Amino acid sequence: MSQPPIEKLRIFGHEAPATRRIADDDAPAADVGDNPYWAAEEDPPHPNPELGCIRRGICCRSSPGWFAPGEVEKAAELLQMPPDAFVKKFLVVDAIAVDGAPVHVFAPVKLDRFGKPALPTGRPVDALYRVLRGVCVFFKNEGCSIYAARPLECAKYVCTNAPADNASHEDIARMWRDGAAVAAE
Ligand code: SF4
């Protein structure tokens, strides 16, 4: 089975280009040291990354996407919860600098290795939390449990895209700063 060109594979916008394990006996040894997520994936055959999202939840297992303005209310409604209760149970307040000034944004909490929120929900998180990987609180049964109301960053993210083609945390934060409404799909 032919392998996709390595240079086309990218995951996690701010990280180095991904390389993936190649299991064919006669294939050159793959450099799996650059990215632990590809190295830990299952054996071939792999889905074709040219088809877009490869549906393995790699992003959901490491760095949840951020909600754009107006989306927290929609996700809360999906779960039939008041928005404030939804925030207190499932979200944290993350932040990133936009044009030199911090902008605060709602994000699904990451879970720790025991399946519990890595930090208290409904509150701001710190810089260390931001860089650590953790499963999204909404990632259940190998899928997104709020898919119909998932964050805009998740909806726009495809791990095989070039980083510049994905929405970034900064893009979402800029929407909050500018008070932009989420465009209707
Ligand atoms: S909200 Fe859904 S799509 Fe986004 S990271 Fe969490 S599980 Fe994945």
Image: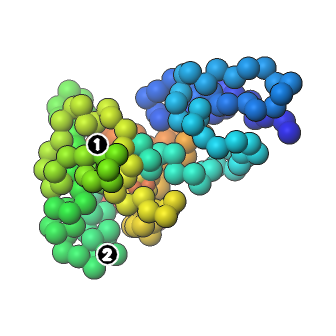
Nearest the viewer among 135 and 177 is 135
Q: Which residue is mark 2?
A: 79
In which quarter of the view is residue 132 placed? top left
Could you tell me the amino acid type at mark 1?
Answer: Arg
- Which residue is pictured at 18% across the width and 75% down the height? 82
Is residue 39 positioned above or below 65 on the image?
Answer: above
The crowding category of the residue bearing disc 2, from other C-alpha atoms within 10 Å (few below 14, some 14 to 19, many at least 20), is: few
Q: Which mark is residue 185?
A: none
**Residue 154 x, y percent position in the rendering:** 44, 52
Tell me if residue 66 can be seen: no
Residue, disc 1: 174
- The amino acid type of the residue labelled 2 equals Leu
Scheme of colours in the image = rainbow
Q: Are marks 1 and 2 in contact (CB under 8 Å)?
A: no
Residue 133 visible in the shown view: yes
Q: Tag 1: Cα neighbours inside 10 Å, few (<14), some, or many (≥20)?
A: many
Q: Residue at x 78, y 20 (%)?
A: 28
Say which residue appears at 81% left-offset and 31% top-offset: 24
Looking at the rendered structure, the secondary structure element under dot 1 is helix
Q: Secondary structure at mark 2?
A: loop
Where, by quadrant of the figure, is residue 102 drawn?
top left
Please state if 75 lies on the left or on the right of 35 as rendered: left
Ligand 1 quarter of the rendering = bottom left
